[in-house]
Image (tube, coloured by chain):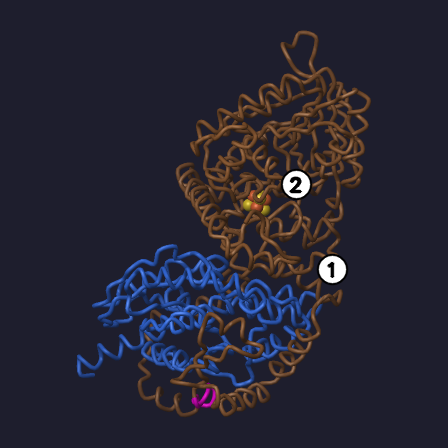
Amino acid sequence: MKVSLFITCISDALFPPIGEAMAGLLARYGIRLHFPEIQTCCGQPAFNSGYWDEARASAKTILEAFDDSDFVIVPSGSCTGMVHHYYPKLFENDAVLFEKSNRLKEKTYEFTQFLVQVLGVTDVGAYFPHKVTYHPSCHGSRLLGIKEEPMQLMSHVEGMEFVPLPYAEDCCGFGGTFAIKMSEISGAMVEEKSQHVLETEAEVLVGLDMGCLLNIGGNLKFHDKPVRVLHLAELLYEGVKNREQTAGV
Amino acid sequence: MSKPQGSNVKERAKSALKDEFLIDAVKFTTEKLKNGKKAATEEHGNWEEWRERGRLIRAHTISHLDYYLSKFIENARAQGVHVHFAPEAKDAARIAIEIAKHRGAKSVVKSKSMVSEEVHINEAFEELGIESIESDLGEYIIQLANEPPSHIIIPAIHKNRYQIADLLSKEAGETLPPETKILAGFARRKLRDKFLEADIGLTGCNFGIAETGSVVIFENEGNARMVSTVPKTQITLMGMERLIPSWDDLEVMATLLPRSATGQKLTVYMSGITGPRREHDGDGPEEMHIIIVDNGRSLQLGDPEFQELLNCIRCGACLNACPVYRHIGGHSYPGTYSGPIGAVLTPALNKNTQEWHDVANASSLCGACYEACPVKIPLHDMLVYLRNRKVERGYTASGEKMAMKGFKMLMGSHKLFRKAVKAGQIGQKLLVRDGYIRSQIGPLKGWTAYRHIPALPKRSFREQWPGLSAEIEKSIQPMSGEMELRMEEIVQARRKGGGHA
Ligand code: SF4
């Protein structure tokens, strides 16, 4: 069984600990994560801006990288959504690549989907004694319907105090190039989101998409707010290691 | 400030974002509408199934629009209605004016109609010296302010009650207190006289029923009923896509529309009008005209990416759900329609010319519009399709084209991508302070004006992987038989054509 990691360009370059956390967590269930090096980016920055030819160049590396994988796991609802919803459209005029994108779509899972739906794991045995709030990213929750999975995983984390985020489902204003092109609108959106995060008085903001967390985290930092921003995989892995240390494993 | 200023969406949005009154008013009301919708749909139950039913009815009608249009026209004519067809906005205005001239009309009283805004009917009447008065309270307010509507359902959503009191006080010639009851009372008295004087009543149309040629109007104030019964002549403006096949289908629409629009279980008044006044009728117009407006709608027919746009029932739910609309209000958008539906409809109806090119950028593609839409129009996808057509037509800036060429080159090869990240790790050194880039210049300044950027770590994930995987190898546990079986089963199911969605 070949289970492969699609790290996503943003986590690859900016947030390597997320890949480490995923590999570390899955190792505990007997999964040896495989990382095909030829992958780059899902192509969304170009695709969403309307540059489909440019997006295809990037998407092809993903099609090739995971051609012989049985499962592909992604630490991003947005990049998973790109594969699921738009790859078949992007390659509709190329019979071979269209077929490949349909196959890739079938085996690609966002990280929490894979844990809960495939492995049937909702309790990773983590201990994380902090106050945590959660931002459900739009693409994951709306386009892929990932709503329960992260909640189930978090509800089993011991010692953790969960505070719901007010207006959680509102977009944080990231939107890729939108944040640059319509910077004032995007800025107003992220300011509002940070405000809501601060209202929870959480120590940690957790999410499933590093684009959004780069945005919200960057804004919190801009205002010098000491909120820790983590991908859920990182939180769970840290929690598992906490538990193992206290148990003396 | 009354209307956000600027020549494009970005500039108008910038100006709107500084207008606290506007933003507060829009936030307040969209929030109320959104919560109302949530409560009403939850209470109704099975909302997803109703949405799907609504989508199917609309999609079916639109894919057989020629058939249903001819049925509608045939049946309306059989009831004595004069039916006209307006290929473009100016034709609709011209036809309305001809009717007014023919009837020797001096004044028109209108109920709410977005199509009438789209074809600028008030201006056309005024040019001829015919008074045209809005009788919907919200429309009346913005008519006094000389502004277009900023929301499909709540035209004056951008005004608070103090601003409204000022406008109505001017009209009344006395100071009216900012109390909704008193203000509405004044408007009602004022408009009642207009109803009695008006020669023509002009209405919009929520649904045209093909099987009987009837016009159905949803409203809350009762003014549309007055408009369609008191004056001797009635003109109804109807977008050519507004049809549904039968009265049975109306049940579904009557369930979806008010709940999505305002969170009401039912609209206060729902009028079905079949032809002009008959011999034994107590009221109604002597003469009834329906002007069916195309104005760019037929361009969407047969377009695989945009045909669904015609399924829209103009409920405004996508506006209320949209975080961008909520921050910038309706006047930041170009054209008559605002919010997510407007961002797609305006360019689409106007042949996607360069003039409208920037509105599709005013979205983070969060999909809240799609989720809110009672007939499931994928507006977030359509925004991307619009951007794609813009690129194909060469409307985008040269700097952006260059950047995308760079993207294509880098992301087309993992070796180049790796090198670029390496170069970034080294090159960023001058910019990084305490692990963050805070510079507010250069191409990223839109980003850094609101956020710091974390510095690239010394080594990317792919650089760390060989060492990491060797380390993690030590913690690999045996897999449980149950898990292995599950995974096997999923892979097997996929081969048989199953697999997850
Ligand atoms: S697109 Fe959907 S949500 Fe928006 S106005 Fe039309 S029907 Fe309503």
Q: Tell me what residue is drawn at x 67 percent, y 50 percent.
A: B346
How crowded pointer 2 is (Cα within 10 Å; few <14, some 14-19, many 20+) is rated as some
Query: Are the residues under badges 2 and 1 in a single subunit?
Result: yes
- Rendered location of residue A249, percent (x, y): 20, 83
How crowded pointer 1 is (Cα within 10 Å; few <14, some 14-19, many 20+) is rated as some
Q: Disc 1 marks which residue?
A: B354
- Rendered location of residue A46, percent (x, y): 62, 71
Based on the displayed image, in which of its 4 quarters is residue B305 positioned?
bottom right
Q: Disc 2 marks which residue?
A: B60
Residue occupying the far left of the picture: A247
Q: Is residue A61 left or right of residue B392?
A: left
Which chain is disc 1 placed on? Answer: B
Q: Tell me what residue is drawn at x 63 percent, y 43 percent.
A: B311
Which badge, 2 or 1, is on the more N-terminal residue? 2
Of residues B248 and A226, which is closer to you in this image? A226
How many discs appear?
A: 2
Is label 1 in a helix, a strand or a loop? Answer: helix
Read off the magenta span. Answer: B458-465
Q: B332 above or below B236? A: below
- Rendered location of residue B132, percent (x, y): 68, 29
Q: Is residue B409 left or right of residue B23?
A: right
Q: A198 above or below B143? A: below
- Label 1 within 8 A of ligand 1 by Cβ: no
Based on the displayed image, in which of its 4 quarters is residue A33 positioned?
bottom left
Quarter the N terminus of chain A occupies = bottom left
The chain painted brown is B
The chain painted blue is A
Of residues B397 and B163, which is closer to you in this image? B163
